[in-house]
Image (cartoon, grey):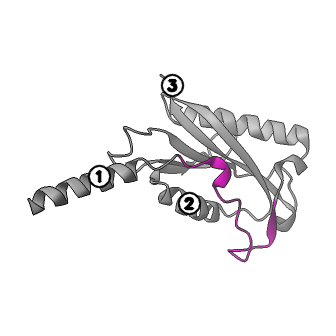
Amino acid sequence: VVAFVVIVAGGITMYRIAQRPLAPLADIPAYPYEKYQMRGVSLPIDSVDSAVRTRAEQALTQFASRVEPGYVVTDSRFLAGKGGFAWDAIRSEAGGYLQRAGYSVDRAGQTPESEIDFAYILWRRDSKFWRPNSNDRILAVALQEPVTPGPSDEQVHIYGYFRLKPAH
């Protein structure tokens, strides 16, 4: 009887964990300059020149739509930062937030051989219990080249977070 109660309680606990809500893209932390004692500041995306911003957002969205075959972009959030670019800081901040929501890194990479050099990280739900309830993916992708060149502390970088869901 005790073993049965323990098994049922464990099953209920795992089911509740699997029901965690999706991680809202708006809650993923912005570039953490202060935390990592870097010179720079997060910028409102609207402060970037609209033509530059539009080109960057289109390039990021096109990359997001191709990174995971069979998946489509269903949500996006764009951010900008002025100062040095440290992709590991974004990976660490976003990864910590997404890990608490049940995601783990599926893969990460760079595309230096492409016309546009991207850095990206793709997260998926961590266990078999998550996948039946949510098979979405979260993608962080950045343009490695600044959209506003200049000295390191004056460069502007644009990156985005995307939610991907199965196409069918």
Q: CA–CA distance between discs 3 and 1?
A: 31 Å
What is the chief secondary structure element of the magenta stretch? loop
Residue 71 circle label: none
Dot 2 or dot 3: first in sequence order is 2
Q: Which residue is mark 2?
A: 97
Measuring from the top left, give residue 168's x and y in whole percent.
Answer: 47, 22
Judged from the image, the secondary structure of the residue bearing numbered disc 1 is helix
* Picture quadrant where residue 39 is located: bottom right
160, above or below 93, in the image: above
Q: CA–CA distance between discs 2 and 3?
A: 26 Å
Which residue is found at the position 68% from the left and 50% from the top? 26
- Please report the bounds of the magenta region as a residue range: 22-42
Instruction: Left or right? Give the position of 158 relative to 87.
Output: right
Instruction: Left or right? Give the position of 108 relative to 119.
Output: left
Q: Residues at badges 2 and 1 in contact (C-beta under 8 Å)?
A: no
Does 121 appear in magenta? no
Q: Amino acid at mark 2?
A: Tyr
The single residue placed furthest to the top in the displayed view is 168
Dot 2 or dot 1: first in sequence order is 1
Q: Mark 2 packing: few (<14 Cα in 10 Å), some, or many (20+)?
A: some
Any part of residue 64 in sight: yes
Judged from the image, the secondary structure of the residue bearing numbered disc 3 is loop
Does 40 appear in magenta? yes
Q: Which residue is mark 1?
A: 12
Report the quarter where the N terminus lies: bottom left
Front-lying residue, 19 or 52: 19
Q: Which residue is mark 3?
A: 167
Front-lying residue, 26 or 159: 26
Q: Amino acid at mark 3?
A: Ala
